Amino acid sequence: MKQALWHLLSDLLTATVFLIAYAVSSDVRLSAGAGVVTGLVHAASFRLARRRSQAIKWADFGLLLTLGGATILTRDPRFMMVKPSLVHFGVAAGMFRRGWMVAYITPIARQNVPAAVIVAAGTLGRC
């Protein structure tokens, strides 16, 4: 449970920083800059800690830079606000891949539960 909450907070960190900064300052450029800097620090911490990062994290980071830059250039906060939705649609699309759930199962469960059951559990949610 704790690990799932950590991943959720990690995924929503830049959007949360943007929204808080925007609520406090009402300055779109400053808020988008704060979100982008938060994303840069977050990505750098992953690299410095040499933690394995999945492709979705790098796609999220690229989306942050793109949409954050668009927000700064156009002063339109909707670019930054749409980022979490796009990332979550990407995650949902990834769940259509067979066996997606295997990476999220604990090692002890992988040893005790047959692989076919894990794959089936990940597939049943799509019915």
Image (cartoon, rainbow, N blue to C red):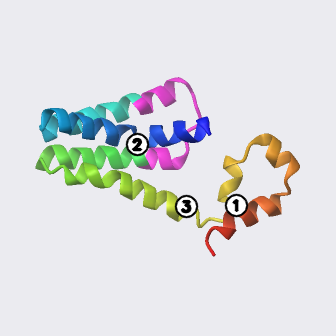
Q: Position of residue 93 (x, y in %)?
A: 51, 64
Task: Give the side of residue 26 with respect to residue 1, left or right.
Answer: left
Q: Earlier in the sequence, mark 2 or mark 1?
A: 2
Residue contact between numbered discs 3 and 1, judged by CB atoms under 8 Å: no
Q: Is residue 52 magenta?
A: yes
Stretch in magenta: 42-59
Q: CA distance from mark 2 to mark 3?
A: 18 Å
93 vs 99, left or right, is: left
For this rendering, which residue is in front, 84 or 5? 5
Residue 25 lies, with reference to residue 112, above or below; the image says above
**Residue at mark 1:** 99
**Disc 1 marks which amino acid?**
Gly
| Discs 2, 1 touching: Cβ within 8 Å | no
Q: Position of residue 21 (x, y in %)?
A: 22, 34
Q: Which of the two residues, 53 or 4, is positioned nearer the viewer here?
A: 4
Residue at which label 3 appears? 94
| Mark 3: amino acid | Gly
Image check: 30 left or right of 120?
left
Query: Residue 69's image quarter?
Result: top left
Q: How many marks?
A: 3
The type of residue carrying mark 2 is Leu
* Residue 111 colored in magenta in the image: no
The residue at the point 58 percent across, 62 percent down is 95
Query: Circles 2 and 3: CB distance less than 8 Å?
Result: no
**Image position of 4 with respect to 126: above or below:** above
Badge number at residue 12: 2
